[in-house]
Amino acid sequence: MWTQVAGSHKRSLLAKAAAATRPIPTLWTSLFGGIAWPYIELAIRLWIAKLFGSFGFMQMLHWETALAVASQENPIPFLAPNLAAVLSTAIYVVCAALLAIGFMTRYAALPLLLLSSIPQLLYAPFDTQLFWMALSGWLAIHGAGPISIDNLLRRGLSDSAVPLIPRIIDFSKRLRGYGTPIYTFFLRVWLGIALLMAALSRSSGAEFKDLERWLPLDVAMRVPLGAAWVGGVLLLTGLATRYIAAVLFLGLFAYSTIDPRVTDSIYLLMFLVILGVYGGGVVSLDELLVRLRDRVFPLIKRHGLDGIQGLPRVVIVGAGFGGLRCAQGLRDASVAVTLIDRTNYHLFQPLLYQVATAALSPGDIATPARQMFRNSPSVRLLLGTVTGVDTERQTVSTPNGDIPYDHLVLATGATHSYFGKDEWARFAPGIKRIEDALEIRRRILTAFERAEAASLEQHRKGLLTFLIVGGGPTGVELAGAIAELARFGLEKDFRAFDPAQARVILVQAGPRLLPSFPEGLAQIAQRSLEQLGVEIHLGSRVDHIDETGVAVDGARIEASTVLWAAGVAASPAAAWLNAPADKAGRIIVGDDLRVPGLANVFAIGDTAASRAWKGEIVPGLAPAAKQGGAYVAKQIRATVESRRPVPAFRYRHLGSLATIGRKAAVADFGFFRLSGAPAWWLWGIVHVAFMLGVRNRLVTLTNWLWPTLSLAAVSA
């Protein structure tokens, strides 16, 4: 029994230590710790790898000089000078390469830590050498971040059958769990003392020769006097560590940019970033205040499943952008959240068309929903389909039974609208789900395969005709992707015909493409599509669709593959509530996103029609759904915590993007507009940044860049 108690206590300590490495879930840490930190950590690791790798290559290029220096001052006394030179060079090159790819990071950083402590090996100011030692120590303790081979292998290796490997992985987790908060504590104190000593030296003229051996005083002297005093005191006590680190970072970064002589301050900037993300460590006033806060306002997630009994019940229907953001905003609130969706993954819908055109696989844009809330016991995920809502009994109906709620959030999204011609659906599928994308992919690729086997030219023409109905962003992106697939993706795959002969037709009922974009960008998009060979029919209406073609303004077009991107309709949520709706079926909500007459029911995303965009209807975009989800989470928290209601919802338009093939896009941000290749790169960066999961980002980025680089190599 005592063994079990000791083991449980040990696991509890490890969990607390690991929790200390995770920042408190605020907007600050969600932005910098969740989104920016993986890339910042990668940049720091690559910088250190480049630094030590350059030492190794310099020694190889000037080998005679390296041997002469080793003979005069042997840095490793227990080895012969030539062996010491060979060993140090090999460590620099091999360990730097391992750091660069993030493989065996801890074990690569440790030899570099030992070598950086030998002054004879590195010709640099002692302050800089101290920073190198500290950064190598950070990598040896914390290991690689999310963008690394170590991170990709960690979960699989923890269950490996290879002897000792699971133990090593377990040791690495414990080292990170215990070591990171301890290391950040010493790092904070180290930098705090350095800033205070530098400020004291500048104020009194005193010199601290004995401390120069242990503190980076030269770099600390570059911090303005007032900032050094305030920053030193706050870092030493651990009060507002993240925010003081951010202020010092911005000030020192601006100063370093103005004065190029202080560019070696980059190492201090790196450590300020680490403190900004991970905080002050185990012993700090910040930690004391957090514990006091948790004692006064206990968090549900600290109590496990038993602690959520009797708490207000929040039911969120739909795990899209809006529903997911709402659940994330409530994960540490005093509520019990139930998230219901028809699938067990979150789908990044903006890239569905790339799955449909075989540029990406389904797994690249789908992230398991349960994985996101693994450490949030107050959030429960249910796989199911909601069939109705009983507002009197306050229950949500599913095939598995009724689910009671105290607060209901409807984020049920939208589906295709065929404007009363629902029989067209089986001939012209739309694209809203992975199943839709896979069906469209099957039809497109099958059309090319059947064309290869076709014996009649007329039959082949029909098979190689692809018609897209609707000239909005989805239609434009589909048309461009199919045209590029035919001309650049399949150009050498068939023998009976040239895939570039494929005819891609885009039919738009309106007078121009991309109605939500400025007219100038719409014209640029049209020209880009026409350069790809896409035929564009503006002001044209579809009269009929069947399995062999389409009637457009009375003229028959034989096309074996017809795709629908012309309209959407909201889910039946308005009918469930008997609530007022617009023509698209969206619930007309108030300025607080509440359903009229139902104070505890909210609608967000494509389910809601809100005039929160300067009096206009909020567009059905992912950022709009996210903003709505975050807003409703704040509203529910304010109600539960008896705080003042949140002001009316105001949508902040972040811009509109649409891509036309692999080399062009259009971007509208209101105050400036982009088109062509720059807009395409911006489009890619934005989409990768907002995807969930590091693996999805890396795979998607690779799938995008490789064809581009391949085409560049061929053209060169």
Image (cartoon, rainbow, N blue to C red):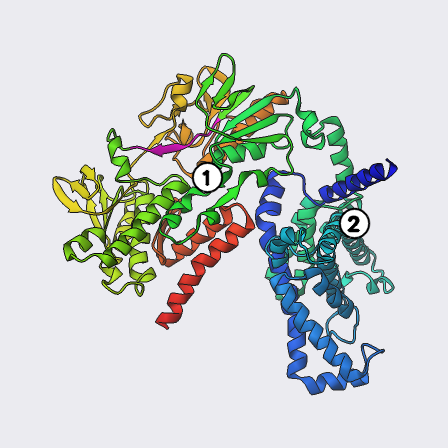
- Does the image show residue 225? no
Residue at screen point 61% across, 65% down: 260
Q: Which residue is mark 1?
A: 623
Q: Is residue 150 magenta?
A: no
Quadrant the N terminus occupies = top right
Q: Which residue is mark 2?
A: 182
| Residue at disc 2, secondary structure | helix
Q: On the picture, is 32 further left or further right than 191? A: left
Q: Nearer the viewer, residue 3 or 287?
A: 3
Q: Nearer the viewer, residue 343 or 700?
A: 343
Location of residue 334 in the rendering, given as x and y in whole percent from the top left corner: 65, 26
Q: Residue furthest left?
A: 554
Q: Is residue 450 above or below residue 293?
A: below
Residue at screen point 37% across, 26% down: 586
User: Looking at the picture, which amino acid does disc 1 mark?
Assistant: Pro
Image disc number at residue 360: none
Task: Specify the quadrant of the image occupied by residue 65.
Answer: bottom right
Q: Nearer the viewer, residue 115 or 401?
A: 401
Q: Is residue 414 magenta?
A: yes
Location of residue 480 in the rendering, given as x and y in whole percent from the top left corner: 31, 52
Packing grade of label 2 (10 A; few <14, some 14-19, many >=20) is many
Residue stretch rendered in magenta on the structure: 410-417
Packing grade of label 1 (10 A; few <14, some 14-19, many >=20) is many
| Residue at disc 1, secondary structure | helix
For the residues bearing labels 2 and 1, Cβ distance under 8 angstroms: no
Location of residue 163 in the rendering, given as x and y in whole percent from the top left corner: 72, 58
Q: Earlier in the sequence, mark 2 or mark 1?
A: 2
Number of marks drawn: 2
User: Looking at the picture, which amino acid does disc 2 mark?
Assistant: Ile
